[in-house]
Amino acid sequence: MSEKFLDRADQAGVYYLPTGRRTTIETAAGRLRLRTLPVDLSRAASAGEALRRLGEALNFPDWYGANFDALYDCLTDPECFPGNGHLLPIDGIAALRQGDPQAFATLLEVLQAAAGQRRAAGAPLWVLIDTHAPGIHSLPEA
């Protein structure tokens, strides 16, 4: 994966990325001044636990209610989630898919919607998950 793809803000969204490629992507993101915020969901088998861990990892404000609406609001609010672009590598998301498939699907929908809004605002949000999911493409190599 080269910087060229990450530099294309119009392509930002939710992608599958095997963990073996993560270091290369994070290095490229750093060169592009994207803020990298890793999230570990390997012990989050429920929506509540996944949303709590996301809030902690992303340093959301006290008013974050650990629900899907609040997640979207925080991800799309420039005061809550400042910066010109973000890379969110999410590890262990398969635990949520196994423990609560509906919450897994809803989380992906919220992340895709937030990435779309951030893309339109010119502050790309790249979300990289470590497991295959329906409708989620692999991050291209170049």
Image: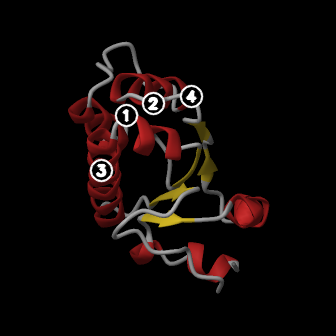
Work out how far the residue at label 2 is from the one at label 1, CA to CA, in angstroms. 30 Å
Q: Position of residue 43 (x, y in %)?
A: 56, 28
Q: Mark 1 or mark 3: which is in front?
A: 3
Work out how far the residue at label 4 is from the one at label 2, CA to CA, in angstroms. 6 Å
- Amino acid type, mark 3: Ala
Q: Which residue is painted at 58% across and 56% down in the image? A: 130
Instruction: Please tell me whether mark 2 sits on a helix, a strand or a loop.
Output: loop
Work out how far the residue at label 1 is from the one at label 3, CA to CA, in angstroms. 27 Å
Residue identified by numbered label 1: 79
Q: Residues within 10 Å of mark 2 (few under 14, many from 20)?
A: many
Residue identified by numbered label 3: 105
Work out how far the residue at label 1 is from the one at label 4, CA to CA, in angstroms. 29 Å
- Amino acid type, mark 2: Ala
- Answer with the quarter of the image where residue 5 lies: bottom right
Q: In the rendered structure, find residue 43 and report the number of the disc placed on it.
A: 4
Q: Earlier in the sequence, mark 4 or mark 3?
A: 4
Q: Residues within 10 Å of mark 4 (few under 14, many from 20)?
A: some
- Amino acid type, mark 4: Arg
- Amino acid type, mark 1: Glu
Q: In the rendered structure, find residue 45 and report the number of the disc placed on it.
A: 2
Vertical placement of residue 70 versus 3, above or below:
above
Instruction: Please tell me whether mark 4 sits on a helix, a strand or a loop.
Output: loop
| Outermost residue to the front | 98
Q: Mark 2 or mark 1: which is in front?
A: 2
Instruction: Check if mark 4's residue and mark 2's residue have beta carbons within 8 Å.
Output: yes
Vertical placement of residue 111 versus 12, above or below:
above
Q: Which residue is painted at 48% across and 66% down in the image? A: 15
Q: Earlier in the sequence, mark 2 or mark 1?
A: 2
